[in-house]
């Protein structure tokens, strides 16, 4: 079985998840960072997985462009979709539905959000400020902190979700 995992990332969370996913899949798995390569010959693969980090509520523009370019081909083969984001539960599901085209989500054999990471030292001042403001709002809404102290890196990536996603992709025909 040949699987292509394409991903778009800003700070590395989607890349980290794509690599974890690749390690859990059987067969020939190829990783493609959409920041480095914009095209692929999808006919070479039996299955395709698309992943992106979410930044300011949107998936990365490289992932959007890839999907727009290959939407027809993606609908004709088993496809998996994942996001890396700090949202969870119903909010994460809404984000997934909003980021990917409806026709692709409906046809996908696996969809999930794996969690996310915040790397404060990699962010600029404006990004750190926005994350802290959003984090305070979320703390009030959910009664817990998604951003910790706002200075120490945070990861909510779930290896269990990555594992379950891999099993769903393996089972897809």
Image (tube, grey):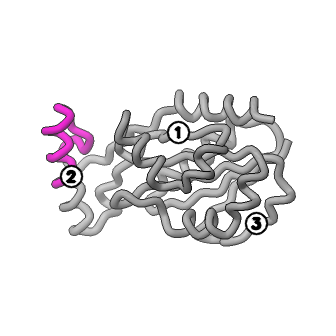
Q: CA distance from mark 2 to mark 3?
A: 36 Å
Tag 2 residue = 134
| Image location (x, y in percent) of residue 2 | 83, 47
Q: Residues within 10 Å of mark 1 (few under 14, many from 20)?
A: some
Q: Position of residue 57 (x, y in %)?
A: 36, 57
| N-term-proximal mark, 2 vs 3 | 3
Q: Position of residue 173 (x, y in %)?
A: 81, 35
Q: Which residue is more in the foreground, 9 or 41?
A: 41
The residue that appears at 23% across and 60% down in the rendered structure is: 128
Point out the tag, 1 or 2, that comes first from the N-terminus: 1
Q: Residues within 10 Å of mark 2 (few under 14, many from 20)?
A: few
Determine the CA span between mark 3 and mark 1: 23 Å
Classify mark 1: helix, strand or loop: strand
Whether residue 112 is in magenta: the answer is no
Badge 2 marks a residue whose secondary structure is: helix
**Is residue 136 covered in magenta?**
yes
Q: What's the magenta region? A: 132-149
Determine whether 13 is above or below 160 in the image.
below
Q: Is residue 35 above or below residue 154?
A: below
Q: Which residue is mark 3?
A: 40
């Amino acid at each position: 079985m040949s699987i292509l995992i394409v991903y778009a990332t800003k700070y590395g969370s989607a890349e980290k998840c794509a690599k974890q996913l690749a390690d859990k899949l059987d067969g020939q798995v190829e990783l493609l960072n959409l920041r480095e390569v914009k095209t692929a010959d999808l006919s070479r693969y039996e299955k395709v997985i698309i992943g992106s980090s979410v930044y300011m509520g949107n998936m990365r523009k490289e992932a959007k462009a890839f999907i727009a370019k290959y939407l027809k081909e993606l609908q004709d083969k088993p496809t998996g979709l994942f996001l890396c984001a700090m949202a969870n539960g119903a909010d994460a599901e809404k984000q997934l539905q909003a980021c990917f085209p409806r026709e692709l989500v409906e046809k996908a054999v696996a969809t999930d959000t794996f969690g996310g990471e915040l790397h404060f030292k990699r962010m600029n001042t404006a990004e750190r400020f926005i994350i802290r403001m959003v984090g305070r709002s979320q703390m009030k809404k959910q009664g817990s902190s998604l951003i910790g102290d706002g200075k120490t890196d945070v990861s909510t990536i779930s290896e269990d979700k990555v594992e379950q996603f891999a099993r769903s992709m393996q089972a897809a025909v």
